[in-house]
Each structure stands twice: as structure tokens, then as C-alpha cells.
Image (spheres, coloured by chain):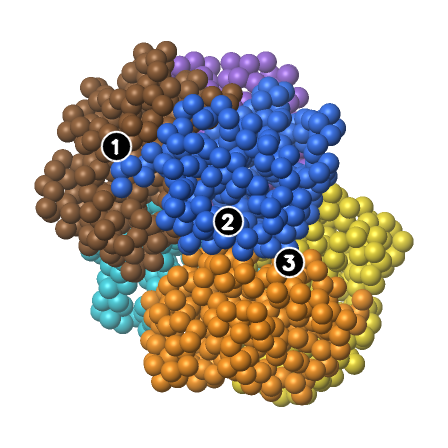
Chain colours: A blue, B orange, C yellow, D cyan, E brown, F purple
Amino acid sequence: MTIYVINPNSSQLITDGIDRAVDPMRSAAPVPIEARTLAEGPPGIETQAHVDGVVAPMLAHCAALEENASAFVVACYSDPGLAALREQSNHPVLGIAEASILTAMTLGQRFGIISILSTSIPRHMRYLGAMGVMDRLAGDHPLELGVAELADETRTFERLKSVGAHLRDTARADVAILGCAGMTAFRTDLETHLGIPVVEPCQAATAMAIGRVALQKTR
Amino acid sequence: MTIYVINPNSSQLITDGIDRAVDPMRSAAPVPIEARTLAEGPPGIETQAHVDGVVAPMLAHCAALEENASAFVVACYSDPGLAALREQSNHPVLGIAEASILTAMTLGQRFGIISILSTSIPRHMRYLGAMGVMDRLAGDHPLELGVAELADETRTFERLKSVGAHLRDTARADVAILGCAGMTAFRTDLETHLGIPVVEPCQAATAMAIGRVALQKTR
Amino acid sequence: MTIYVINPNSSQLITDGIDRAVDPMRSAAPVPIEARTLAEGPPGIETQAHVDGVVAPMLAHCAALEENASAFVVACYSDPGLAALREQSNHPVLGIAEASILTAMTLGQRFGIISILSTSIPRHMRYLGAMGVMDRLAGDHPLELGVAELADETRTFERLKSVGAHLRDTARADVAILGCAGMTAFRTDLETHLGIPVVEPCQAATAMAIGRVALQKTR
Amino acid sequence: MTIYVINPNSSQLITDGIDRAVDPMRSAAPVPIEARTLAEGPPGIETQAHVDGVVAPMLAHCAALEENASAFVVACYSDPGLAALREQSNHPVLGIAEASILTAMTLGQRFGIISILSTSIPRHMRYLGAMGVMDRLAGDHPLELGVAELADETRTFERLKSVGAHLRDTARADVAILGCAGMTAFRTDLETHLGIPVVEPCQAATAMAIGRVALQKTR
Amino acid sequence: MTIYVINPNSSQLITDGIDRAVDPMRSAAPVPIEARTLAEGPPGIETQAHVDGVVAPMLAHCAALEENASAFVVACYSDPGLAALREQSNHPVLGIAEASILTAMTLGQRFGIISILSTSIPRHMRYLGAMGVMDRLAGDHPLELGVAELADETRTFERLKSVGAHLRDTARADVAILGCAGMTAFRTDLETHLGIPVVEPCQAATAMAIGRVALQKTR
Amino acid sequence: MTIYVINPNSSQLITDGIDRAVDPMRSAAPVPIEARTLAEGPPGIETQAHVDGVVAPMLAHCAALEENASAFVVACYSDPGLAALREQSNHPVLGIAEASILTAMTLGQRFGIISILSTSIPRHMRYLGAMGVMDRLAGDHPLELGVAELADETRTFERLKSVGAHLRDTARADVAILGCAGMTAFRTDLETHLGIPVVEPCQAATAMAIGRVALQKTR
């Protein structure tokens, strides 16, 4: 039985980053954790059509894994297909956006989200509204870097520091969330720099999945 | 130029009902109104997977109509693909759920929604949260009839009366919304029976689309 | 039968601006649109006493038009007497503040309002609260120009650009609303300048009224 | 200097009830308390047009009292003209709806409102939304008795007991508010009957006004 | 290193129930899980004074465990001292109320809470408000049984079934939460009976703690 | 009979400031007002552990005063023990945070809070959420001065002016609240400087207590 972390875009680089991000948790997990790439996905999920478009292949992908799964993690910050996968699967299903927000709600009173693009923000706002947690949001600010552009680590980290400081000092966030699965490499350094907790959503969701696998044993 | 009302399920019966529902508005509309069936859709949209699954074919369907379109109406109460179609099209795009709620907000202070199934309700709640209008909701109650079952008009109307009365008297709704594109036939009779405004969402969205076509002329 | 757009202040200049703003819509409207001045109103509606004071004469004015009306639009951004006129009239009644907000909710996720004076803002906040849509508000910022001062078009447009940019960039609005019936002349230019949709409320409400006149045909 | 409690309807019976309700507080008040009838008001305020229509005469009435006033209380549960009177007067101005709600917020976590008519409820909902306190509302239920009908004390008290019990047991209110200035006579008996705090709004607002008169001495 | 689950009341019976409830999770946990009784606590935490009163001894109790702790779980549904313990400890700290609510938010759209006493409910409402999740609440209904009375298992289960059904059918909850640490024995049977997910809060918080212990390894 | 204003920290200087702040109200109060120091409290209440820790001694302190009390005011901006004291006492109990917020809600539409430390703000946010009034908050900004540091009046007033102006101009507060019992000396000067109402919470709560003592006479 395995916790499957599904990267619904087709970028193996992103999947590799997720794999590295969750690797330290493997020693504490009761089951293996496997990061997978959705071959049918676009290179990056940057529009609503991307979000909606990956649902059907992702559901098929996960259906094929159902028998061997302990839990599923949807590893895109738009949580594509989360509700549909919950309807389909008998296992715990977590989305990295939802899980990161719920985790942040235990680490601070007002969370800030660092998004890739300003066009992501309306999508996030709809999602926070659907979750009913708008009163806990301090702000959501963009790096203005697309998924592919995150690979320039120097520039990305500069922007992360600047946007993170703005969320902390002006929007008064007391916890920050990395709003894309492609920022895994920066969590520790950014937390050190900012001095407030920084949540990496793939890690947060996988941690929650580990707990759920344990919880399933009580059922 | 045409207002296209897209039924994203494949039931021609539903499309025919929509066509009849908007027919009286044609004389007041500045452009033709055409109700269309999405052949690729399921017979009824009853799960989140149905909702997500129709987005891609619907976007393709609408892309082919873009050049001749004045406006698009997405005629399913889950507003599938609404955000994606807005990103894709240069024309006004309205969803029947959103439009019916915005319309109800001008006809009463607290709206009640009559859903087909109780499994639809969590989806509606997420949507109302995303719209940020939960404080205007009186309640959302199901007929416990699937899309196909709505065709039994006697039974459907009995349930509509009973659920509608419950929303009015117990949940204290002062306006009711028919929460499915398959209930077009009942609006007038139900409004007469309940004595509070009843909004049929295909009509509400098409009315709003007519206004938007007029508004486009100021741009 | 006519859509009456009632300017509840006594400034014919404002009424003329409204008339010009809705003029392009006339070719798409099923009935005539007539902009009217409430002679009993103050030159500009800038205080709560102004708002409350125009209700009685406006109700009388509209009662006299009831028989020939298809719909009423209350064309002041405080929507004076909107609830009372709805109780009085058998026709659709729309207010420009409410209609502009509902329209903006279909064009973006977070709307910004450009007010004339900072003293208008508490009134707007009460109204947004009453509408239950505070979670969709990005911000409400004033030009600090009274109704009469709007006539200096150069100064007004400078302020509109500056306040609009602040709403877009700092408050993160993705759609802007002109928060006074006296800014009709600036919508197109401001939208071009800002690069996000700009809603002129008299146009938005009249568009919605045109839709409602069509919708009435289904009743 | 005097605390003026203005009954904006023209029913002296209601004013007399208010006078009796606040009479025990006179011994504890630093200034006289005078209940006054607005001669220009309707016999009862039951529609939005009534609410809006009394504002202008009430403002004039209060302007004439300004020089001798310590504070004003607007004694109608729709708080007509509250914002306008605050703009006009240099003294503390309290409305009985607002004050009763703020008082109830210190006596329980969820308040229930007992309204006269179901047509009052949308008005109350708009007001609670404007106050931003919808999350504290347990429910608002009507007696279905007009202002004049409240005079039949036996029937009124029967309805109060029944609606109050429903708010307590079904809507889970832990404090109840009498939603009309014409129910002053019933507070004590209803509180005894229900076993939860019952707030009479004229008393609550006058109590708050007494505090404000004391507070003014610190300015 | 150990996950300490602190029962802040002094009833060993409750602690034993918690121990049994989390026992199946031990095989999946990376560290031992130890349920402890706060000797200084009252037999049951039923008033706000109880809640506030256990904070100081619980902080001292946990300070003595800090060096050996992997995480702390506060096992009382009022989450006494949660914020204070977070300020004191360097380890993850979870409260059973908060964790059960966050868990329920991933299992359904509207959660219902089954409380012991109606006097618990205002405390819960304040807490849900502080968490900013009121829009996700379907209802909170009491068994009207004190902590000690829960020991009568037949009566307790009868009440649980009745209150749970009411939350599901009338309040329209799609997930239920057991609102006291003393109901551990009933989760499975109640879930089977109701047909919707039932969250036992000690299990939910311990599951989340297991995940956090894994997450700490990434830091 | 006496209104007891309990300073739950042990700083007599703070108590003396409270005494001076409420002194002008004594001539308007129906009973004596006595400011008391809780000897068992810490010198300043700056952490959640401080807040929770003073509850038990404060309850004991107030129990001894119960027989002679007309009302209690808890004079710390975290309102420690407010709910517990309400459960214990038969008299009106007011907290300075709650009372200042309710008062501010009648003086403006959006209140700003001036806190001592940024670590106070999450605690305030939880409290505003529990009160259900987040939509009325403009912002909460810190002086970054501890309780003891407030004694440097020149520096404190400089910071108050700067933070107050920021709340007024950037956060768009139209009323400001002094978020600590140790700022009593600055209210008048700050109000003059800012030009918007400034609420001193000990005064606001005592004023409300005076009203409640009067209100008790109607019971």
C-alpha cells in the first residue's frame, strides 16, 4: 500500500522536486510515498482550463492505482479534481492547497499565500471562499513568475523574499504558504529569512496523508 | 450574432425545455437565442466528475461558436467551466447558477435553492462560498430526484411544492431558485403556488445575457 | 412602456450624462429608455440625509410613471429608496449600486469601488454588508471630489487613474466600479488605461433592466 | 439637558409604553429622560416607505431639540434615520435595534429576534448585514401581528411565548430581542417564561445612552 | 520521543478511553503515543472556569515533558490552553476541537457537532468564530449529558443516534464530530448507523500529530 | 453597591491611570466606581499564558466582591475570564475589549485597533472572530511597546500618532480603539490629533456598566 502524490502537470522536474521535498518524511511514514507525474497534463497548470482539463486523466490515473493506494495527494495548488477524486476513491484524498491552508491555520492566525502569477489569485480566492476561510487570509501576492520560470532559483528566491516580507509586514501574515508545487526547494531558506512559519504544500498534504493512513487503522 | 445557451449534458429533452423556457424572451432580445446540446456530455450532470468532465468538450464547442457569438450561457446548475470559458471567450459568459443567484439577490433578501439530489448540495455550498454570498442563503433542499426522474411531472411538481414550502416557511426564504436546468416547466405554477418569486435559472441567465449584449454596445 | 432611469438629484448635467451613457443600448432594448431628473432632489447626493430625503419624492415620481413603466432604475450610487420602490412597484426595480456590484461579480473576483468622497465610504460599507458581499470587496477609495467638482474633467480623470491604479495594484481589485452616477463620461478611457474591466453603474443597471424586461415576458 | 427618546411613529400609546419601560431607569440617570412622539409619523412603521419617510421630519424634530439634548434614542426597530441623525447631531445617538443587538451580544452568543411581521424580516436582515453581525444571529421569527394588533395583550403574549420558545429550542438562541418598540410591556414576563435573557430594545438603548452621557464627561 | 495526549480533566476513565481510541494508530506512528491524565484538572470540563482553570497546571505538566516530546495533543473539546501551549512549546501542538474541525472540513462540506450540554455550545460558537469557519457549521446540538453521565453507554448511544440523525437530516450536516473526549467508544457504531463520516476528535488530532512528527523531519 | 473595575495585572500605575480615566464619569454614575488591582496578576498581560493565568485569581477576587457589586468591568484588552466571570456572577459583567468594540461600532463603520505588540494581534483576531465582527475591522497595528514601556509618554504618543494615522489613512478606519488599558492618558490628545473618534476601552466599558446598572432597575 502506498501514498500516491500525483503531480497533475507533466513536468518531471516538478515531480522530482516534490519527491525530494517529501523524502525526509519517508522514515516516519507507515507506508511508501510515491510521487508520480501525470503524463497527460500540461507542463504547468496556469489557467482554469488547465485545472479543469487534468481532472479526467487524473481520475483515470488514480483509478488504476486505487487497489494499491493508502491515500492520494493531489499536488497542484489549484487542487484540480479534489472533490471528484474524493467521490471516486475509498481512500483518504488530500489536496495540497486545502491541506496547506488547514495546516497554516494551526501555525498562525492569518496566512499569506505566495502565488506564481496574479492570474492565479482569483482562482485561489474562489477556493478560499469555497473552503469558508476568507477571514483567516492576510493576503495573496504573486511572484509574477510562471511555473517554468521558477527554475531560475536565484531570481525566484529574491522574489520569494520580497513578496514574503510584504505579506508579513504590510498584510500582517503570521504564517506564509508557498502557493505552487514548484517552490519546494525554497521552504527552509525562506522560513529562516522571514522568521515566520513557511508551509510547503506538498509536504503539508503528505504529512496529513500520513496521519490519515494511521487514522484509517481505527476504522 | 447569437446568444448561445449551452446545455452541457446530452439530453435533448432538457435542451428542448430550455428552448421553450427562453422562447418568450426572443421577441425582446436584440439577437437570436439558440439552445444547444453538448453531445459529449453525460445524460445528466450529477457528480463532480460529470461537472469537471464536460469542461473540455464544452470549451471546444464554444470555441467553434466564438466568431458568431454575442454571449454564452452555460446551462447547468453547477456552472461547469464558467471560469475557463470566461478566460477563453471575448464575449459575455454567464452561468445559470451564478445568474440565478444574482437575480434572486434583487428579488428577496434570503434565497432558497431547490436541488435535485442531496449529493448536489455540497457542490452548491462550495459554489456559494466561492461567490461569497453564503449570508444570503436561506437553505438548499433536495427533491431527491435525479435529472432523468424529473420527467415524471406529477411527482416532480409535488416534490417542488413540498420542498418550496419548507424553504419558505421553515428556512424563511423569500425567493426560491430552481436548482437544475431540468425544471423549466414548473416555474410559473410553483411561483403561483408558493406566493414568493421563483427564479428559473436558464431564463435568469439568458435575461442577463440579453442585458450584456446591450451593454457591449457601450464598449 | 419605458425603462425609466431616475436621477434622484436635481442636476440636469448628471441626467444628461446618464442619457448619453445609456444611449448606445437603446438600439438593443425592447422598449424606450428615458433618463429623468428628480426636481425635488438636492444638486448632489452626498450625505445620508440627502439619501433618505429623496425617497419620498422619488416614490411619488415613480408612482406617477407606474402605468407606463417597464422597469425602474434608481440612478444614484447610494440606491436611495430601492427597497421602498420595490415594495411599491409591480415592475422590476434596479439600483445602480446593487446592479454594478452584481455585474462586477461576473467580471472579476474582487471589485474595487471608486467613490467621490471618503464620507461616502461608510455608507457603501453598510450597503455591501446588507448585500452580504463584503468578501468580494477589494477596496473602496475616494477621489475626494464632490458631485459638482466632477465637472472638471481633466482633474477628475487624473484622480480616477490614480485611485484606479491603487485599487488594482495595492488592493488587488480585478474589476473596478465607478461609484457615482456622475462619472459616466470616463468609463471607456479608464478601462483602457487600467487594463481591467470598469463598470459604469448606470449602464450596468440599465443593461440588467433590459434583461428583466425580457424576463417579464416569461411570466 | 435631556435624553430624548423619539418614537418616530405617531402612536401615543407606543410612546406611553416606552415611557413606562424606561421609567425605572430615571433614578439612575444623570439627566432627565423624555419620551416623545413624532407627530408626522405613521401610526406604525411597517414598510420600508414608512422607515424612509419619517427620516426628514425626525431630523427636523431633533434639530429643534439639539441645544437641550444630552443624547438621542431613535425608538423604532428599523432605526430610521440613525446614520443621518448621527451626521446632524453633536450628541450621542443610539438606535434601539442597534443597541439591543450590541447589548444582546454581551448576554449570549446567539440572539434571536422576535419580529412583528414576516415582512419586517428582510429589513432586519439587511440591517444585521450592514452591522456585520450575521454570525451572531440564531433566527428572526415573526408574531405575524401588526403594530396596532400588539395591543391585544393576551394574544400578543401567547405568540411571544410560542415564538420565543421556538427561537430558544429550534434556532438555539441563548438571548432573545423584542423586535419592536411596541412590546415593552412583555419583557419581564417573557424572560421569566423562557429562562433566557430577553432584551427590550428601548430600555437597552436608553441604558446605553445613560452610559454615553457619562462618557461624554470624559471628553 | 513521544506524542503526548493530555487529558486535562482528572478522570482516568476518560484517559483510558482515549488510550483505547488511539491504540490502533500506534502501529503506524513513528514514535510512541502516550495518553496522560492531568491530576490537577476537574473530573470533567463543563464550564468556562474549568477551561481557564486547567491551563496553568497543563502548561506546567507539558513543560516537564517538553524535552521528551515529539508533539502535544490537548484532549478536551474546549482546547484549553492551546494558544498558550503553542507559545510555550517548540513542538507541534494540536487541540482536539481544532483538529477535528479541520479534519471534518476534508470529509464533508458542512459539519455537525454533537455536544454534551447546551451550555457547551456558546463556548463552541466562540471557538468556531475564532477559527473563522462558521460558514462550514451545519449545527451544534447537545446530548444534554454531563461528562460523567456519558458512562451509561446505552443511554449515550441512544442520544448520539438521535442527535446525529437530527444533524444529518434537519441541519444537513454531511459529516459529524463527537464534541467531547469522552465519546471515543461510539465512533464506529455511530458512523455505521448514520451513514456519514463521524470524526472522533482525539483520533483526528493524534492522526494530525503523527503527520506533524513526520513533517518535522523536513525542517 | 459599586461598579468594580478590575485591573488583572499587578501594576498599580495602570490601575491609577484607569482610576483617572473613569473619574469624570463618577458624577454621572448612580453608584461608586472603584478601580482595583489584582495582586496575583503579572506586571503586564502580554502573553496568552498571562491571559489564562489571571482567570482563577480574578474569579476569586470577584467572588469576594459579589455581594457588594453592581457590575464588574474586566480591565485588560484581552478580556481575560470574561465568559467565566459571566457564568459566576449575577451582575452585569463587561470586558474592555468587547465594550470598546461595541462602542466603536456606533461611532464609525470600520474600527482600527492600536495594539501594544504585534504578538497581541493574533489574540485580538481570535477574539474579533469569536465576537463575529471581523467585517467591521479596518486593521490592527502595533506600537511595538510593552506595557511597561508605555510609561515613556513622549515616545508612546509619537507612536500612537503614527499608528493612528496609518489606520485612518491606509486601513481606512473611521474610529480608533486604544488596545490596552495602559493608554488611558492619551485618548483626548490623540482624538484631537487624528480627527476621528478615539475610544479608550476602560471608559467605554465603564460607561456601558453605568447603563447596565440603570437597566438592572427595570428587572
According to the picture, the residue beneath numbered tag 1 turns out to be: E24
Please state which of residues A154 and C17 is positioned toward the viewer in this rendering.
Answer: A154
Q: Please determine whether, in this image, residue D130 is positioned above or below residue E73.
A: below
Q: Please determine whether, in this image, residue B1 is positioned above or below residue A155.
A: below
Asked whether, in this view, residue B66 is left or right of residue F209, the answer is right
Check disc 1 and give the amino acid type: Pro
- Mark 2 or mark 3, whichever is nearer to me: 2
Please state which of residues D128 and E48 is positioned toward the viewer in this rendering.
Answer: E48
* Marks 1/3: CA–CA distance: 45 Å
Residue for point 64% across, 58% down: B84
Element assignment for label 1 = helix
Asked whether, in this view, residue F14 is left or right of residue C96, the answer is left
- Rendering coords of residue F185 (x, y %): 55, 23
Residue A217 in view (yes/no): yes
- Mark 1 or mark 3, whichever is nearer to me: 1
**Callouts 1 and 2 in the same chain:** no
Check disc 3 and give the amino acid type: Ala
**Residues packed near mark 2 inside 10 Å, few (<14), some (14 to 19) or many (20 plus):** some
Assign the C terminus of chain A to one quadrant of the image. Answer: top left
* Marks 1/2: CA–CA distance: 31 Å
Residue C66 in view (yes/no): no
Check disc 2 and give the amino acid type: His
Q: Are marks 1 and 3 in contact (CB under 8 Å)?
A: no
Q: Chain of mark 1?
A: E
According to the picture, the residue beneath numbered tag 3 turns out to be: B84
* Marks 2/3: CA–CA distance: 23 Å
Asked whether, in this view, residue E45 is left or right of residue C154, the answer is left
Q: Which mark is residue A198?
A: none
- Rendering coords of residue C105 (x, y %): 63, 59
Q: Which mark is residue A61?
A: 2
Q: Chain of mark 3?
A: B
Q: Chain of mark 2?
A: A
